[in-house]
Image (cartoon, rainbow, N blue to C red):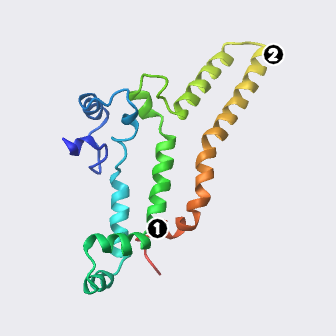
Amino acid sequence: MVRHFLHDTDVFSGGLIPTYINIQKLGLYDTFWVMVLPFSVITYYIIVARTFFTTGLPEDLWEAAQIDGASTLRYFFSVVLPLSKAILAVIALWSAVGQWNSYFNAMIYLRNSNLQPLQLVLRNILINNQTASSMMTGTAASEARELSDLIKYGAIVISSAPIMCMYPFVQKYFNQGVMVGSLKG
């Protein structure tokens, strides 16, 4: 049951309908947690992190920690995590961008308008504005289209601003983390 609770535990998910049924059965439908729990584990990120841990950290570190008497947890928190800042920052950025841009899941699993994320609210504003401007004719239509375009551009800036503010904090790790597992020439 826990295996199917997480959305992407397999490289290929079961699809929309089985996921919807699982979310209904778990009582997550139309709750805050439907946006957090089922989509928090993504297999690709696990594969990237595993690749880093197996290729980026020499086994000599583990042997040295064992000789010094460090337990597995001590080794993980004292050695592995500090050396993994780059990959963790990249995965955090990818996860944040993926969650931030996700409006489809909210469209499917949320009916309460108070729980809808900003992306879905902006999408609804754009669709309503586009529909209203397409129903007009003449000078009013051209003014409505200009207003529609302004609203569209404003929505893009508003929806991109939080991610753009987050990027400078992880930028120094980004190049190093993205190159994990690549061929060195």
How many other residues sit within 10 Å of disc 2, few (<14), some (14-19) or many (≥20)? few
Near-viewer residue (54 or 148): 54
Nearest the camera: 171 or 73? Answer: 73
Q: Position of residue 134 (x, y in %)?
A: 66, 17
Report x, y in % for residue 89.
Answer: 48, 61
Query: Residue sitting at 30 percent across and 82 percent down?
Result: 65
Left or right: 3, with 132 as reference point: left
Check disc 1: other Cα within 10 Å, few if <14, some if 14-19, many if 20+. some
Label 1 sits on a secondary structure element that is helix
Q: Disc 1 marks which residue? A: 85
Residue 162, placed above or below residue 140: below
Q: What residue occupies the far left of the structure in this picture?
A: 1
Q: Residue furthest front?
A: 69
Of residue 131 and residue 27, the one placed in the foreground of this image is 27
Q: Is residue 180 left or right of residue 175?
A: left
Amino acid of disc 2: Thr
Residue 182, by quadrant, is: bottom left
**Total number of numbered discs in the rendering:** 2
Q: Is residue 106 left or right of residue 126?
A: left
* Residue type, label 1: Lys
Give residue 142's quadrant in the image.
Answer: top right
Q: Which residue is identified by label 2?
A: 139
168 vs 179, nearest the viewer: 168
